[in-house]
Amino acid sequence: MQISIVIPLLNEQESLNELHDWIVQVMQSNHFLYEIIFIDDGSTDGSWDTITELSQKNKSVKGIRFLKNFGKSQALHAGFKTAQGEVVITMDADLQDNPEEIPELYRMVHENGHHLVSGWKKKRYDAIITKNIPSKLFNWAARKTSGVRLHDFNCGLKAFDQDVIKTIEVSGEMHRYIPVLAKNAGFSNIAEKVVQHQARKYGKTKFGAERFINGFLDLVTIWFVSKFGRRPMHLFGALGVLMFIVGFGFALYLGIDKLFLNPTGRLITNRPQFFIALAAMTIGTQFFLAGFLGEIIVRTRKNDTRYTVSDKINL
């Protein structure tokens, strides 16, 4: 199997036949051995019926159906787990990604040795105010925070070496940061390719303005996880020790002052330094315990996919 094409979708029935025929044309003209994996993320418009019909006509079509909408990350996770191709291509089902880009993406991974190639929709056909400008801000922040020099983190058209998709874990809403996850896993040979973006032909976008807020929150999360995810004690333990030292310093000062310098002065419990010392040592202890528990979780946690499959085709 040379290429696995993983396509997550939600209510995209109108575009599936056209997308399938377009992909098949590209695959056959380039003599690729391929599979198309559609992941129906809880569609309610008959998308699964169309996938079933396509699988009956083309044995290279496979399908996974979720019981409900779990999100794009979970859909990609299921597709990655199933994919058998040497190179795995992800693309959206709304016909805004051009299948004609697939051969060059394949060659960049298979022949040039890139671990990951991310598409860059340099010329976009989206609304400027609601999508283009927020997207530019988001990508700028992602570059600065992660150190991965890509122009379009959220482009659905990407190509992966199979080792990458079998190593990384895509959960929550971390599909935006797959290049960062790959880099953190040691796959540093990441490239970018300008790809053609097409105007949406059917339906309407599933994403609103809230996705950018969620995206920035996820960016903070992945920054923290990338730096301290495998060693939480390095952060929480250091903060805990610092806070405890501050509190202990105030307590020591109060003790020396009361015993030797001003024994007839105010009671220790009537002085504000007492409450600072008490709060600092309590918070420091809690930080230290948080780091300790984090270390235990890191060493014992199991992969949590958080999705339920109701049907499969050709798997």
Image: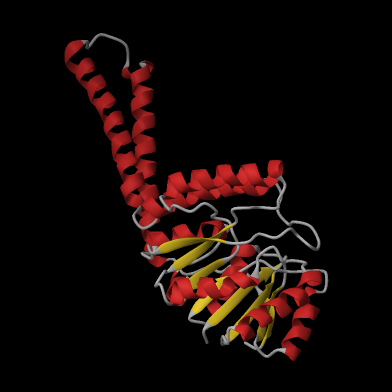
Quick one: which residue is furthest to the front in this view? 29
Left or right: where 131 falls relative to 18: left
Left or right: where 57 falls relative to 186: right
Confirm whether residue 179 shows in the render: yes
Residue beneath the point at 44% across and 71% down? 164
Residue beneath the point at 37% across and 51% down? 227
| Among the 4 quarters of the image, the one containing residue 157 | bottom right
Depth check: give the residue in front, 57 or 77. 57
Q: Position of residue 303 (x, y in %)?
A: 49, 69
Depth check: give the residue in front, 108 or 178. 108
Q: Position of residue 63 (x, y in %)?
A: 68, 80
Quick one: which residue is furthest to the left in this view? 260
Residue beneath the point at 62% across and 43% down? 134
Say above or below: 255 vs 212: above
| Among the 4 quarters of the image, the one containing residue 22 | bottom right
| Among the 4 quarters of the image, the one containing residue 42 | bottom right
Q: Position of residue 158 (x, y in %)?
A: 54, 66
Q: Position of residue 311 (x, y in %)?
A: 70, 81
The number of discs equals 0
Say above or below: 233 vs 200: above
Say above or below: 302 vs 175: below
Residue beneath the point at 34% across and 55% down? 231
Left or right: where 289 falls relative to 120: left
Confirm whether residue 166 shows in the render: no
Left or right: where 224 falls relative to 63: left
Q: How is the image coloured?
A: secondary structure
- Please identify the quadrant where the C terminus is shown: bottom right
Depth check: give the residue in front, 186 or 121. 121
